[in-house]
């Protein structure tokens, strides 16, 4: 079998399994997927937490599949698949042979970010092909200088910023590379980089106008969720913790490399590696090392200076070069005595993670009796509340307010897909037309055995008490406590338009 065919079979099988297993076994989507569907229903230029691309794509799958939610799992698989394709092309462009590119793809696939998190389609996963594609296009642009490469790079950078502002880290890394190295810097005298930047900014104009119109909502939300330093210790612990997490997320790669070496190969590895690596130098290695380590170094430096704690999952797109780096620096597969063992280890790691995903959906409720979002009775809750609303008011439910999980599940599953009025806060829900809410009324929902809604809702209705509550069985035959869902109906004309306390 040729290397391209082997890569196609391996990556294609993985992507298919990571899409099929949650499609067939997950009773309810994960939080980020439910949240994205609730946002996507509104088709805005931005949302509370993120730019709009993830939500737009989820809404597209919802409409293409006739109102199903499994499209989120396939979007994750598509993101990974495009990432594999671009990693393959980038590996070849950086001087790896076809079989080396195959092994780069395999080793990348067993890093944690390409495994267990896959079913939860979110901006982190969507960034995988964005980062790989931008690196590939930039390498082509500085080598060939074609305007088409620069323009596509600008368009992809804009797509990335519509996905998550974290892509600014990669844009900055590209810009710094262009300034530092002469062979890239010479392009500043041509039209390419300037057209790239201009095209990117032009595509971003609608989102920037939305940001201004909403008082920079996403940036405010990010600032409110940040975890500033509490002591000098945080300036050391937080960057160290982030780095340790990223190293741990490469455990699968390390295990596959060690399996290919075996004990005998490990003993002879250092002496053989020294001679083999002398063959490698030049612009390709410089490019690889720059983009593999500079983004990580910037994050660690920012964490050390500010003391802020960065989410570990932000590292998802930063390590698309890990497999290429391992193959290049460790001279693989040439220095592997047992390459078949390495492949067997990679397949075993993937089987374990796929088994964990299957086990979480099918087996976990039989031994772990804690409530899970995956088994939440989202459809039953949404349809039950919609029936209660119609019985009480004689109309279809149009607006639902509450916390993200409670309200978003109703938005996703209820007939007509009512709009989510997140926490009853117009600032956090700029898509809401309060006059229309006043005209049609509002249902407030929350979970748990409590008579009053959330404190955020009580700001608008200080004396509020639930109109009723109902228990819903989780979607499993295992022993799991029922979900208690409460509701409060706010009739037309009685919707609060501003806080009362």
Image (cartoon, rainbow, N blue to C red):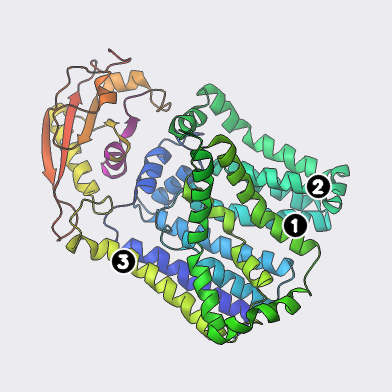
Of 320 and 428, the residue lying toward us: 320
> Which of pointers 2 and 3 lies earlier in the amino acid sequence?
2
Q: Alpha-carbon distance for marks 2 and 3?
A: 48 Å
Q: Nearer the viewer, mark 2 or mark 1?
A: 2
Q: Alpha-carbon distance for marks 2 and 1?
A: 15 Å
Classify residue 236 as left or right of residue 384. right
Of 124 and 41, the residue lying toward us: 124
Q: x, y percentage for residue 318?
A: 58, 53
Residue drawn at x 29%, y 59% is 26
166 is within the stretch colored magenta: no
Q: Quadrant of the C terminus?
A: top left
Instruction: Give SS at disc 1.
Output: helix
Q: Nearer the viewer, mark 2 or mark 3?
A: 2
State the extent of the magenta-drawn residues as a range.
406-425
Tell me the number on the disc at residue 139.
Answer: 1
Classify residue 111 as left or right of residue 369. right
Residue drawn at x 35%, y 20% is 434
Q: Residue furthest top?
A: 500
Find out whether the residues at labels 1 and 3 contact each other: C-beta distance under 8 Å. no
Near mark 2 (Cα within 10 A), the count class, few <14, some 14-19 or many ≥20, is few
Instruction: Give SS at disc 3.
Output: helix
Q: x, y percentage for residue 472?
A: 14, 46
Find out whether the residues at labels 2 and 1 contact each other: C-beta distance under 8 Å. no
Q: Quadrant of the N terminus?
A: bottom right
Question: Would residue 146 be visible to someone looking at this image?
Answer: yes
Tell me the number on the disc at residue 358.
Answer: 3
Find out whether the residues at labels 2 and 3 contact each other: C-beta distance under 8 Å. no
Residue drawn at x 60%, y 67% is 323
Quickly name the residue at label 2: 180
Residue drawn at x 63%, y 80% is 269
Q: Alpha-carbon distance for marks 1 and 3?
A: 39 Å
Q: x, y percentage for residue 457?
A: 26, 24
């Amino acid at each position: 079998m040729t290397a391209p065919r082997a890569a196609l079979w391996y990556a294609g099988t993985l992507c298919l399994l990571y899409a099929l297993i949650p499609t067939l076994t997950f009773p309810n989507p994960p939080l980020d997927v439910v949240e994205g569907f609730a946002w996507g229903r509104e088709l805005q230029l931005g949302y509370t937490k993120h730019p709009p691309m993830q939500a737009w794509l989820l809404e597209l799958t919802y409409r293409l599949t006739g109102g199903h939610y499994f499209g989120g799992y396939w979007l994750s698989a598509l993101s990974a698949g495009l990432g594999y394709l671009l990693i393959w092309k980038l590996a070849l462009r950086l001087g790896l042979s076809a079989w080396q590119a195959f092994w780069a793809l395999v080793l990348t696939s067993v890093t944690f970010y390409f495994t267990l998190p896959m079913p939860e389609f979110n901006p982190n996963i969507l960034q995988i092909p964005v980062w790989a594609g931008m690196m590939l296009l930039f390498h082509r642009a500085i080598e060939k200088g074609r305007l088409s490469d620069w323009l596509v790079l600008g368009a992809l950078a804009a797509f990335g910023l519509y996905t998550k502002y974290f892509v600014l880290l990669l844009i900055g890394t590209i810009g710094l590379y262009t300034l530092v190295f002469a062979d890239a810097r010479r392009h500043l005298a041509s039209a390419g980089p300037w057209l790239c930047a201009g095209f990117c900014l032009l595509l971003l104009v609608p989102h920037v106008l939305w940001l201004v119109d909403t008082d920079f909502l996403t940036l405010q939300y990010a600032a409110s969720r940040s975890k500033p330093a509490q002591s000098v210790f945080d300036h050391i612990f937080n960057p160290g913790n982030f780095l340790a997490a990223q190293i741990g997320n490469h455990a699968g790669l390390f295990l596959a490399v060690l399996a290919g070496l075996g004990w005998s190969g490990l003993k002879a590895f250092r002496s053989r590696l020294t001679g083999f690596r002398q063959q490698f130098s030049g612009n390709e290695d410089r490019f690889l090392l720059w983009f593999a380590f500079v983004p990580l170094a910037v994050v660690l430096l920012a964490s050390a200076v500010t003391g802020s704690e960065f989410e570990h999952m932000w590292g998802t797109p930063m390590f698309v070069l890990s497999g290429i780096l391992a193959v290049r620096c460790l001279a693989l597969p040439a220095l592997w005595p047992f390459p078949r063992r390495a492949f067997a280890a990679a397949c075993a790691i993937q089987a374990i993670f796929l088994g964990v995903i299957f086990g979480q959906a099918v087996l976990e409720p039989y031994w772990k009796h804690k409530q899970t979002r995956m088994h939440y009775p989202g459809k039953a809750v949404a349809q039950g509340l919609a029936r209660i609303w119609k019985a009480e008011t004689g109309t279809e439910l149009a607006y639902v307010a509450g916390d993200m999980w409670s309200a978003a599940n109703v938005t996703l599953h209820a007939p007509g897909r009512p709009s989510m009025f997140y926490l009853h806060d117009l600032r956090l829900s700029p898509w809401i037309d309060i006059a229309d809410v006043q005209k049609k009324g509002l249902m407030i929902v929350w979970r748990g055995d409590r008579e009053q809604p959330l404190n955020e809702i009580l700001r608008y209705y200080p004396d509020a008490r639930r109109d009723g509550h109902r228990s819903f069985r989780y979607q499993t035959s295992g022993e799991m406590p029922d979900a208690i869902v409460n509701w409060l109906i706010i009739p037309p004309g009685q919707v609060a338009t501003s806080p009362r306390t």
